[in-house]
Amino acid sequence: MVRRGSLILCGAALFVAWNALLFLFLWGRPTFTGPSNGVGVEPGGNREWVGGVDLTQDVVRLAEEVETELEKQKLLLQQIQGHRALWDKRKQIKQIKNSDVNPFPKRDAKSAMVNDPKIPEVKDIVIPILVIACDRPTVKRCLDKLLYYRPSKELFPIIVSQDCGHKETSKAIDSYGDQVMHIHQPDLGDLAVRPDHRKFQGYYKIARHYRWALNQIFHTFKYQAAVIVEDDLEVSPDFFEYFRSLFPLLLEDKSLWCISAWNDNGREQMIDQKSPELLYRTDFFPGLGWMLLKDLWEELESKWPASFWDDWMRQPEQRKGRACVRPEVSRTMTFGRKGVSLGQFFDQYLRFIKLNDQFVPFTQRDLGYLKKEAYDRTFTEQVYAAPVVTVEELQGNRVSSSGPVRIQYSTRDSFKAFAKALGVMDDLKSGVPRAGYMGVVSFMYRSRRVYLAPPPGWTGYDTTWS
C-alpha cells in the first residue's frame, strides 16, 4: 500500500512540475519588437514574421498547446484516481479474505448448519465431477456444458473415466487438455456371465467401470465427495451451485444418502416451471447426475454388484430407509438414446425432460426444511390436507377447488392405472415409485399440483410391488 501511495504522489508531483516548467517557459520567453519596418527573425529559426499580426498568431498557437497539455494532465490525474479506487477495492477484498467473515450469506440458524464445526464452509468445498465415458465422442457436448458453467477449476475438478478403449472418444476427451483429467479403466475384457445374461454383458461392464472409477475418486485421489455424471448428460446453469449448496445437508443429515439432479417426472407439462427453486426428498434413487459421500462408497464397495448397479441401489438392503434430494426442475437432461438400454424409456419419457434454464442461488437459501423431521411433518400435512378427487374428475376439469388435489391409490394395480392415465412413470422398483416419497408422487397436471398418494397412515413400501 505504501508503494501504491507513492505512485499517486509521484503522479501529482509530475502534474505540478510540468505546469511550473510551462509557466517559467512562457514567463522567460523573449519579446521581439523587430526594426521599425516590422520585419524580424525568430530566435533559433529562419522564419520571418511581421510585428503584431504574427505575434498574435504565435500567442494563440501557444495557448492551444497549453490547453492540449492541460487536457493530457487532466486525463493523467483521472487515471491515477481510477487506479487509486481500484487499489482501495482490492484492499477491501483482501481484508475480507483475511478475516473470519464468510462471503457467502449464512443460512438461517434453524437449519443447524451455520455454526457446526464439523460442516466445512461452502466456499472451501472441493467436489470432483466424475464423468463416466465409454464409446461416445459426443461426450464433448457433456464436457462443453460442464466447462462453460463451472465456476472454479480448483473447487470442481472434472475427471473423465473412460472404459471401452474407444480411440475417437479418447481423442475427444484429450482435446480439452488440462481442463479435465482423463483416466482409463484398464480391464477391457469380457466378463463371465450366466448364459441367460449374455445379452447383458454391457451392464456387467458398466458396473465394473463404476467400481473402478469410484475407487479412484475416493481411495486414489482421496476426495470426500463426488458428483457422478454420465457422458450423455447435459447440465443446467446452476448445476454446480445446486450440488455445492446441498453438500452440507448431505454431510449432516444421515437420513439422506444422495443428492440427485434428476426428476423422473420432470417433463415440461408436469412441473412448476415458475418455481425452479423447489426441492424434495425422494425414496427412489434417481441417478442421472448424483452426489455421494466417501462414507457411503466405503459402505457399498465391498458388496458392489456385478451388474444392474442402479436397480441394486434401489433395493431396501442398500437404501436402508434413506432418501435422496431431487429438484422440481431437473438440473440434467439426457441426449443419449443409444446405449446398453437400447433406448428404454428414452422415446417415451427421457427426451421430454425439461432442463432448468434459470440460475437459482441455492447457497444463499435456507435448505434446513429438507431435514427429515421438519420435511415429513410439513409434507404430510400438505398432502393429506388436499381434497381427494378421481382421475375422471381431474381429467374432465370437474374439480371445484383451485388448489392442490389428491388422487388416492391403495393397490399396485390402481397406482399403475392412475399413473399411466396422468402421464406419470408407472414402474416401481422394490415397491418404490419413481420420484416417490412416503408412497406419494407429486407432480403438476394442467397447472395444478397433484399428489398421487396412498391412504393416510402409510406404513411402508411393499417390495412385491415391482
Image (spheres, rainbow, N blue to C red):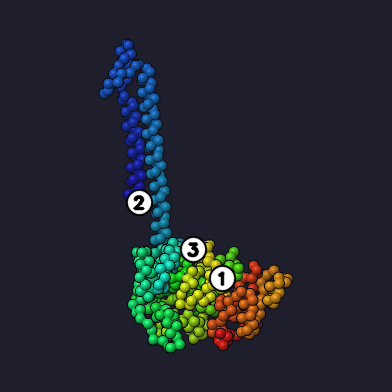
Q: Amino acid at mark 3?
A: Pro
The C terminus lies in quadrant: bottom right
> Label 1, on which residue?
266
> Label 3, on which residue?
237
Of residues 419 and 460, the one nearer the viewer is 419
Whether the residues at callouts 2 and 1 have beta carbons within 8 Å, the answer is no
Q: Secondary structure at mark 3?
A: loop
**For the residues marked 3 and 1, what is the alpha-carbon distance in whole angstroms?**
17 Å
Side of 402 relative to 358 (left or right): right
Crowd class of label 3 (few under 14; some 14 to 19; many from 20; radius 10 Å): many
Residue shown at the point (38%, 84%) measured from the top left: 191
Closer to the chain start, of discs 2 and 1, is 2
Q: What percent of the width, then of the height, locates residue 104?
A: 47, 63
Closer to the chain start, of discs 3 and 1, is 3
Side of 166 relative to 260 (left or right): left
Of residues 454 and 299, the one nearer the viewer is 454
Crowd class of label 1 (few under 14; some 14 to 19; many from 20; radius 10 Å): many
> Label 2, on which residue?
1
